[in-house]
Image (cartoon, helix red, strand yellow):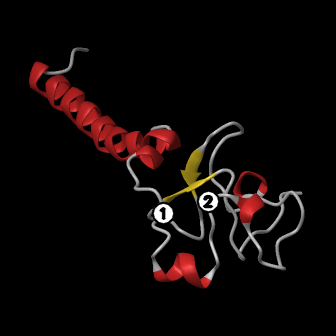
Amino acid sequence: MSTHPARRDRRRFIRIAFGGAIAVPLAGLIAPRETRAATKPKLDLGSKTAQRLDYTPNAESSTNPKREQGANCANCVHFRGDPGDAWASCNIFPDHRVGAHGWCEAWVGKG
């Protein structure tokens, strides 16, 4: 028993359209986070949030008594980069990148 050609074409079109409707939003989720993070500007030290949290791009130069020895953005749970990344997204500063060697009062060690 054969199916009418118009029905086959319509079914094929629906499958392709449905697949495309699913694939387009997923493409944004699958894109590497480095690509998305690279488009964000580096954190401005003059921003209110950076000043409130005493962010510094060089943790070793911090005089904040809350900073633990060896604490920096690269070993913080909020740092969204991979090991070896010099700059990456941060949960605390979501619209900016922070330096791996930086530090702020929101630091929480990985572990």
Q: In which quarter of the image is residue 54?
A: bottom right
Q: Which of marks 2 and 1 is in front?
A: 2
Q: Nearer the viewer, residue 12 or 73?
A: 73
Residue hosting label 2: 57
Determine the secondary structure under disc 1: loop
Q: Which of 17 and 80 is in front in this view?
A: 80
Label 2 with label 1: CB-CB less than 8 Å: yes
Q: Which residue lies furthest to the left in this view?
A: 6
Residue located 33% across and 36% down the image: 19
- Residue 48 in view (yes/no): yes
The amino acid sitting under disc 1 is: Leu
Residue located 56% across and 47% down the image: 87
Pointer 1 local density, CA inside 10 Å: few below 14, some 14–19, many at least 20? many
What x and y, as percent, mark residue 3? 20, 20
Mark 2 to mark 1 CA distance (whole Å): 9 Å
Badge count: 2
Q: Residue 67 vs residue 48: left or right? A: right
Pointer 2 local density, CA inside 10 Å: few below 14, some 14–19, many at least 20? some
What x and y, as percent, mark residue 66? 83, 79
What x and y, as percent, mark residue 90? 59, 61
Vertical relation: 27 (above or below) 9: below
- Residue 77 in view (yes/no): no
Residue located 86% across and 57% down the image: 70
Residue hosting label 1: 43
What x and y, as percent, mark residue 39? 38, 48
The amino acid sitting under disc 2 is: Pro
Q: In which quarter of the image is residue 24?
A: top left
Image quarter in which the N terminus is found:
top left
Vertical relation: 49 (above or below) 1: below
Q: Residue 61 carries which label?
A: none
N-term-proximal mark, 2 vs 1: 1
